[in-house]
């Protein structure tokens, strides 16, 4: 454990960020999973809504630096490809 006051504060801040980032990453996985489930069920309307939501969340996570912007682009491309195969 750190003895320096500023380092103790930094450890606490980093832990808060870690927990927040973990929650956002989990939310991203859930959003992508909803798209996959809608595609498997062949529900076009639900898939379109799910892909819009997933893309929005991925963009937000990338802008906040939780995931890399290229990672967000790859995931968006992947889910959009699944939905496009339905149409």
Image (cartoon, rainbow, N blue to C red):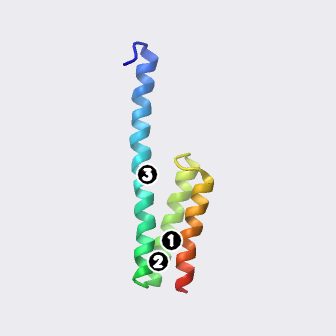
Q: Which residue is mark 2?
A: 47
Residue 75 horizontal/vertical position (percent): 55, 63
Residue picked out by circle 1:
51
Residue 38: x, y in percent?
42, 78
Q: How far apart, in angstroms, are the residues tagged by discs 1 and 2?
A: 6 Å
Distance between mark 3 and mark 1 Cα atoms: 17 Å
Residue 30, position in %: x, y?
Answer: 40, 62
Identify the residue at image location x=50%, y=77%: 48
Which residue is found at the position 41% from the left and 70% from the top? Answer: 34
Mark 1 residue element: helix
Q: Residue at x 56, y 57 (%)?
A: 59
Image quadrant in which you'd find residue 70: bottom right
For residue 79, above or below residue 21: below
* Residue under label 3: 24
Question: Which labelled disc corresponds to residue 30?
Answer: none
Q: State which quadrant residue 4 falls in.
A: top left
- Confirm or deny contact between disc 1 and disc 2 (CB under 8 A): yes
């Amino acid at each position: 454990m750190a003895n320096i006051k500023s380092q103790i504060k930094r450890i606490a801040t980093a832990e808060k960020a870690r927990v927040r980032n973990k929650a956002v990453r989990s939310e991203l996985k859930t959003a992508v999973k909803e798209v996959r489930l809608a595609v498997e069920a062949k529900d076009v309307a639900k898939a379109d809504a799910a892909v819009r939501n997933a893309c929005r969340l991925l963009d937000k996570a990338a802008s906040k630096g939780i995931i890399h912007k290229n990672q967000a682009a790859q995931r968006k491309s992947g889910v959009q490809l699944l939905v496009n195969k339905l149409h």
